[in-house]
């Protein structure tokens, strides 16, 4: 998993603190401390797995004695009944970590599954599906990871790593040209500049002043085709707005380079995944 | 908003740090520092508002000079075009906070909207809709707040404030009676105890040993009706598993006290809400 | 120890940071880095042990190479000279951690000892001793753990896990009935509701509106007996106020379910516990 | 109050987080949001006040709209009924902060009261009472402040700001002279060096090698007198071990410069202080 | 100042905690609490100012009652005696914050001064001076800000916002082409790719596979000129390695787009800046 | 390394977070996850090593699987080509940690090198070189450690561990005598008191009132000699102000005990140190 270890640790720690608070009243009182068991994490529906490493860390942080054996990798297809991982060790710890681990797995796999379905819709084209900043506060790096796992690409990570000049910015600057020129003077030469345009006139203005990426906002497929023709490969073109699974193919056919979809992260449904204990035995010798 | 101020501040701070990193390259380079403007936050579809106070704090934390005037309250109905709030002040700050504020508003209003729709389905009955721990890691208190705003009730907040003995716990303890007795000995007399049962025999066992709440897991309406009859008001009964918007009414008719739905928080779709700037003027005098 | 690992780690980390700051000037300059030794943690008076796991973590955090072998468990009786634990490893690390480990052990064992003494006073009755929120800021979970170790029970953990309607709340709400009804509408059905009453009229009002627990504030044993009679087992009754070790038995005889004592945590005297080094030798081979 | 603002803020924030968690269920459901009231903080017994500024910050952090008016200052005498402070503002906020504010005030005033009583016992002598590192983990700076308020002096703050060579260090170094010489080579010339001695021979050794302070461990008054004679003002002498309120005067008469008492912080009883609401009225205008 | 407020607050808070610890012993004991004064921050040598806003926040955090009036802006020239800012308010607070404020101002102005001197050396050319990741751990955003203030440009901020394929990466990947192709497949289409080359053959390889920026490592001016000719404007060229103030002009003449200098941040000398109090008076009325 | 482990961990964690953010785009995309390699950390110039343990922790935190073998110790001389350490393990991890590890090593070795050069200048005298509080915000404990490694001594660590009465304090207190008396009453008897004087009259005043250390500010060697004579060994004398490498010997000859130099930490040049990978092979078996 290509996310910084410290970032992952922090998000896992917060989730455990939120759920456990001062302690798991049920497991601590009902389950003997020395009881060992094995839990099976299984999918209950079709989908794409994402977040295995996060689940592993949830249990590792709770109890370093737990063994977590992944049986499929992130990005692989899941069917009802697919065994995702085996978790063995203290029954208390497994039960205390179950919900947090599943919450991560279900949400991330839900995003990977939706992304994968979208990518399949445009298979064969050179257009790529990208995400947006419409992510759950605090989980962006994980949700963008799930998009990559599902076969999508990431757009910028935040306000700090790229310039994106949207309608509101243009309004404040008094025009595309002025906005782009200010950006070019104000930021590092290493940072890419993107401009959002609503029609072909704005596109021409963006091409004239010179940017790296142009976002075509809410354009019809016909307009997008014309935009592709006019850009002539000088910039990356990104289609955005009003894009659903059922019109993805039509948008891709226009020849745009990128299609961005906020729904990948803000409206994905969680995938149904469960953890079941299969046996329990007292710990023999340590 | 009845969530601790310190909790709210922390979640807002994290979200801003995640999105802004070392700084907003676009606003800082494109928008003059002294420019003042007004932004309108508006709904683009039907729904129920939740999270106004969170949005207010996003802007307040970013720039204490921003004025945020809410126009509707959490819990009120939104229609396409409903003005939710006016944000006025530094154009740079408004643009830098826009996405984070909307991410909160859209997610929380999405949950409140879905909850409200479910609650309407069983209007007239005395059954209540409750949430679960299937929440987004790090946002539980906010998501549970959104459920309340939508007319639902909260189940326990975490592993620390109630005993919930599920199938896995029963397996580990060797039976309902043993599990409940251990819990009663092990936890504060102030903590309620709930047991999950799968059939009427288990229900009888739970009633015999004495608990506060019984969760009826994946039972048919007929079984639930019989469970309600046997419980005779001695415990709260909670229906769980396989519940969808379209069978809610049938479940409520069985007379159970509570219906819990993980989907309220794990699979709600974001509500479409936007922020548009309406004017810009240089700051006259400070 | 049934306290969340992350909670324990945080409190131990803070204590070490507070005492060590940028480093232990004495041990680092006076004791050779390679010197190995064994320290004995021993009780110097009679009492009940609490906090062994905390002491273990103090040393583990400071130096993972230290071996900590507990010789008695939390809850066991201590006499002058009882060996509590052996700590072996780097002499520097043992000396640097000594004070912090003892500060925890002494305070927690002091609370467990006092609690145990109170519990003994009412042995044979079915009344239970419970703690309050009058704990040391930052150490509540640990101090409540020490109360459990001493044989007491915990009351609520904080403002977030139970409703407790006290005189000031009743004043603000305009009466018991109004206060309780608001609470019942406002909180999760899973949360218990307690009301504080000062006389029998208030008790009757509380019984009429229906609550889970009633706190009898500063009542005489005679009044409490009458309260027990009137409640007839419908609610838990908690005696509070003016309770000392020497009148505990009299209060328990009234038949109340719970007796709460703030003194358990706010006025317990530390137990005298020491750490002595018994030998020192240069580290041979690792 | 001469404690760093950031330090104070952190300890207050932690205490509020611990008690409020996700929110105060009782105040939020029972007390109307707009209700204003006034609370009186009063002493219920004789003592010395410490911690007023901490109480003020508890309320300020919870709700910047609360007004907190201190009526006596830290260090002043309290009698049963002394009005310590008036708190006015939102009834909800006052009730939510009450316990945390009182927990600080009661503990710190308890320490100041005990210290003050000890200082009075040796009034007229030039000997000073000093504290130790036997403080509550996480509260050291506050507890040492309370000692100062009570008329005592502070010993070192932690392991980082002074060298204190105790019996265990001497054992590890192989003698007083070797230990002191290592310390002098190893630490800043700005750091004072203290040595613990158990008899006069060790005192002579310490005087010969040259240190700043000598701690006389568990010596009889007669031995201490002789130690004072031998030291002849070349070093500060600190009496330690076995010191109680009733033998303080005898120890001070020996002429030692300092008497250190762990009990000041580890075994002080909380002072009884209460908060009562005196009126409630709906907020007229904002 | 275009650095995120939360980032700035954190770095200021840490610096104050580091210096003040539990409190300023000198100011708190020597300076009366009510004393008001005015401090003048002045330059003692020639240079360029950077960090005024950081100094302002140091005092604001320490004591919100302090007034800080900047007299010159970041980026302006300083001479011996130039008045940079006036700080008025509590004498204690001004003295407690003095060193931390000056430490920031001196270091950042030192970087801005050195950068400015380098930029002047190549005035008239279109080449830009850029910084590197050779910054002080924990201060990168501030140090990169100081480079911008001095007229330089920023290179990437960290490992997360750009791809930079250096000699070690090429070695691990087995060649430039393979490395670049992996990067292009693996990262967002929004991220720029730079490759480090040591000779013209490598440059040709980089041009062939298509990258955004090429770093010319330790090349002679003659080689760089040839590189500029071959690149023909298709990529940005960055000169790096062995560049000193005295050969900057020669490097710029080769026509490279960027010259990166680690010395800007890792070896700048602090600028000499002082704070002097000019008057003191007791606070009249608040 | 005699710096607290928790302190070191925090500073290393911050540095990694700053540089890696959400992840190392280059290493993660270009270098295969399973590739193992060996990196050599080597000096490229003459100097004194400091910070080896910090570099070790950078890699350990990033990837516990990395082996770090130091080849020279802190305090040893480096020449061009000296092998400082071998780092072996995952190629990705080594590349991701390289810059942060080198940034620490280069800065700390730069300080140790400069300090060592200064100490050599006064070899043979009994005068010691001490540092100041003019350190990089956030790195003080490390930079003061580097001064010790270079053979210097530390002055106070912060405002919290010593009293230093400077010209501004004297101005606020109305004279040396008043300032010193206030300090003596206000702080622990364990804390040393230093006064800054500008002429012999002030020195006499300081000697009369009795302090531990006197700082001679910006005095000529002749004046310092006279100050040494007058002090007659009753206090430590510290020379400060206007001291450069080339007049160090002259200052030491005056017989002062300490010479403090801010330049040790605020203006040291980084030492040139590099990391090169020497081989790469796929991981055989785990």
Image (cartoon, coloured by chain):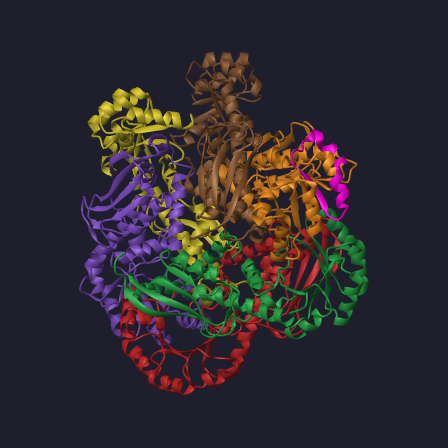
Chain colours: A green, B red, C purple, D yellow, E orange, F brown
- Can residue C265 be seen in the rendering of this structure? yes
Point out residue F22 in the picture as x, y percentages from the top left corner: 56, 53
Point out residue F57 in the picture as x, y percentages from the top left corner: 46, 42
Q: In the visual, does D113 lie left or right of D15?
A: left
- Can residue D228 be seen in the rendering of this structure? no
Res. E286 image quadrant: top right
Span of residues in magenta: E225-253
**Image height of C231 relative to D206, above or below:** below
Res. E107 image quadrant: top right
Q: Nearer the viewer, residue F196 or F143?
A: F143
**Image height of C175 relative to E134, above or below:** below
Point out residue F277 in the picture as x, y percentages from the top left corner: 53, 42
Point out residue D115 in the picture as x, y percentages from the top left corner: 32, 39
- Magenta-colored stretch includes residue E244: yes
Q: Quadrant of the N terminus of chain E?
A: top right
Q: In the visual, does E278 lie left or right of A199?
A: left
- Magenta-colored stretch includes residue D210: no
Q: Nearer the viewer, residue D137 or A272?
A: A272
**Image height of B248 relative to F183, above or below:** below
Taking the spot 24% from the left edge, 73% from the top edge, the residue there is C229
């Amino acid at each position: 998993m290509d996310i910084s270890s410290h970032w992952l640790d922090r998000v896992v720690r917060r989730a455990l603190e939120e759920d456990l608070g001062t302690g798991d009243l049920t497991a601590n009182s009902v389950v003997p401390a020395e009881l060992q068991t094995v839990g099976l994490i299984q999918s209950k529906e079709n989908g794409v797995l994402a977040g295995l490493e996060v689940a592993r860390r949830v249990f590792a942080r709770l109890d370093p004695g737990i063994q977590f054996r992944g049986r499929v990798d992130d990005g692989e297809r899941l069917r009802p009944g697919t065994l995702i991982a085996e978790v063995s060790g203290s029954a208390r710890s497994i039960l205390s970590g179950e919900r947090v681990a599943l919450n991560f797995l279900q949400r991330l796999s839900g995003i990977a599954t939706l992304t994968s379905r979208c990518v399949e819709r445009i298979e064969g084209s050179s257009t790529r599906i990208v995400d947006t900043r419409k992510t759950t506060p605090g989980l962006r790096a994980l949700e963008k990871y799930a998009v990559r796992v599902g076969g999508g690409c990431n757009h910028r990570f935040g306000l700090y790593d790229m310039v994106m000049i949207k309608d509101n910015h243009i309004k404040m600057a008094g025009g595309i040209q002025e906005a782009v020129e200010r950006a070019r003077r104000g930021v590092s030469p290493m940072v890419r500049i993107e401009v959002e345009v609503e029609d072909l006139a704005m596109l021409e203005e963006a091409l004239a002043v010179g940017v790296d990426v142009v976002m075509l906002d809410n354009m019809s497929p016909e307009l997008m085709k014309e935009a592709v023709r006019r850009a002539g490969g000088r910039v990356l073109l990104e289609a955005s707005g009003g894009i659903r699974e059922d019109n993805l193919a039509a948008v891709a056919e226009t020849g745009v380079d990128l299609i961005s979809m906020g729904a990948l992260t803000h409206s994905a449904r969680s995938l149904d995944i469960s953890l079941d204990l299969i046996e329990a035995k007292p710990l023999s010798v340590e």
